[in-house]
Amino acid sequence: MDPAPRVDGNGAGQVGQSRGCRVLHVIPVDAPADRVRRVQALLESIAHPGTEVAVTALPGGPQDLEYHVADHRALQLMLEQAHRWQRIYDAVVVACFYDPGLRELREVLDMPVVGVGLASMHVASLLGARFSVIVGRAKWIPRMADNAHVYGFTRRIASWRPLGVTVAQLHADPLGAYERIKEESRRAVAEDRAEVIVLGCAAMEDTAARLQRELGVPVVDPVVAGFKLAEMLGDLRCKLGLSTSKVYDYEPPPGTGPDPARVPGSAGGS
C-alpha cells in the first residue's frame, strides 16, 4: 500500500522538514512479486533511518526491455502513474540500465528522477579513473554507450563487456551468470585496466558484494547506486528545496507544471 499523500496538493515537502524522504523504486517491467520483495528488502537494509522505501513493478508491462520497442509500453505505464507518484514521493528511481523514460519523467514530475545507468556511472567515476560495464548482450551496448556519451562519461569507460546472455537467462541461471560476470570482470581489470566494475543490468542480483571480494576492486550495483543517489536527492528536496530544473530541457507541457506557490524554496512557498 502506498504511503499517505503529502499534505499539499503538489506533493512537495516543506523546506527544513524533519521527516525522512520517500523514495519510489520502479522496476519498469512486469516483475514477479518475489523479485519486488527481494528488492524491497535490499533497499530497506541500506536506507538511512527515516527514509521510506517503496518498490513497484509495472503489471501488464513488458517482461523485459531487451528490445527498444518494449520501452513504449513501459513509458506509457509510468506516465499513467506519474500524477499519483507526485502526490506521495520525494524522488523516483527507474531501475533499468537503459534509463527508459528518464527525460519524460523529469519533464512531468516536480521531483528528482534518477536512472540506475546514470547513477552507476556517476558513482563509478568517483571511485576510480576508469570503469568497465558488464552487460548481458552486445545488442545493449549501442544504446548504453549513447547514454554514456550524453551523460559525459565516454572518456571514463575502459570497456563494455558482453556476457552473451539475455535478461531471462540472468534470472533463470544466476550461478552460471555469476561465473560469466566474474570472468569478464577479471578480463576488464587485467586487459582493459578498469579500476571499477559496473554491473550493467538490474537483473544481476546478489552479485556485487561477492564479486568485489573476489576481484579486489569496487563493484557498483546499479540498483544500490540508483537508490542511494535518489535518496540523497530526495533528502535535498525535502530539506533545501533542490529539485529538477524546470527551464529549458525539462520545462513541463503547458498546464502540467508545478504550482510555484507549492514548490519548496520558491518565492511563493510557505
Image (cartoon, rainbow, N blue to C red):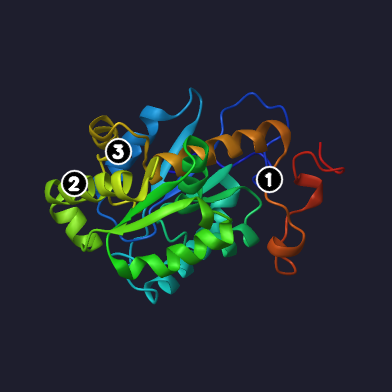
Q: Nearer the viewer, mark 3 or mark 1?
A: 3
Determine the secondary structure under disc 2.
Answer: helix
Extreme residue in the bottom direction: 69
Marks 1 and 2, Cα distance to the nearest angstrom? 37 Å
SS at circle 1: loop
Q: Which residue is mark 2?
A: 178
Q: Amino acid at mark 1?
A: Ser
Give percent across and percent down for residue 197. Answer: 36, 44
Give the image location of residue 50, x and y in percent.
Answer: 51, 25
Residue at x-position 66% and y-position 52% = 110
Q: Nearer the viewer, residue 85 or 204?
A: 204
* CA–CA distance in space, label 2 to label 3: 10 Å
Q: Position of residue 194 (x, y in %)?
A: 38, 45
The residue drawn where x is 32% and y is 44% is: 189
Horizontal side of residue 131 vs 152, given as left or right:
left
Using a 10 Å C-alpha cutoff, classify the residue at mark 3 as few (fewer than 14 neighbours), some (14 to 19) or many (20 or more). Answer: many
Read off the residue under disc 3: 208
Q: Is residue 67 left or right of residue 126?
A: left
In depth, the one of 8 and 161 nearer the eye is 161
Query: Which tag, 1 or 2, sits closer to the chain's start?
Result: 2
Q: Disc 3 to disc 1, how far (Cα)?
A: 30 Å
Tell me, for residue 209, which label it has, or none: none
The number of discs equals 3
Position of the N terminus by quadrant: top left
| Residue 102 location, quadrant | bottom right
Q: Label 2 sits on what residue type?
A: Tyr
| Mark linked to residue 243 | 1
